[in-house]
Amino acid sequence: MKHVGTIVGTAIAGMFVMTVWGAFAAEWGIIGGWLAGLVIIGTMWVVNHYVGIHNNDGAWVDMALGIGTVGFMRVVFEQGAGAGIASIPTLAFVLIGGMIGGFTAFKLEKHIEQQKAAASEESA
């Protein structure tokens, strides 16, 4: 049931982002975009992480995947499968960038742990 809650929670966040954020930004400009980010992402983050909808066990995925999936599928439903197929190269580069970022974060974290271990050995 937690997995269903994760899907529902991230889908709700995605629907709010894809429908409300643009209206806020169109009406109030950059301040509207910041306000939408604060209200939508802030509220949905609290709901998904603290109210208990979001799955924090096992393979953990943040709301960004759900929001991205909603954005992708919205275009597919509105413009047809051709629009989805046309976006595959962009999605591939996003995945490559995510993998590079994840690998870099892993290496940086490992480096920081080694620095801390070396510093604690020197002080002992």
Image (cartoon, helix red, strand yellow):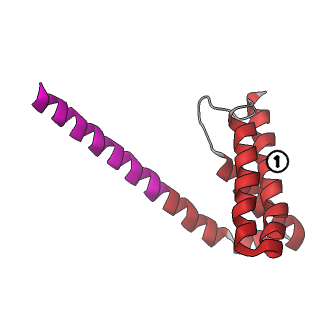
State the residue position of label 1.
12
Q: Residue at x 69, y 63 (%)?
A: 34
Q: Give the dominant element type of the magenta stretch: helix, strand or loop.
A: helix
Q: Is residue 29 left or right of residue 80?
A: left
Camera-nearest residue between 119 and 114: 119
Q: Which residues are magenta?
A: 99-124
Q: Is residue 60 left or right of residue 19?
A: left
Q: Which residue type carries mark 1?
A: Ile
Q: Quadrant of residue 70?
A: bottom right
What is the x, y in percent for residue 75?
81, 68
Vertical order, 64 against 2 (above or below): below
Q: Is residue 93 visible?
A: yes
Vertical order, 49 against 77 (above or below): above
Q: Residue at x 75, y 60 (%)?
A: 36
For residue 109: magenta?
yes
Q: Residue at x 62, y 65 (%)?
A: 91
Q: Quadrant of the C terminus?
A: top left
Q: Quadrant of the N terminus?
A: top right
What is the x, y in percent for residue 65?
67, 51
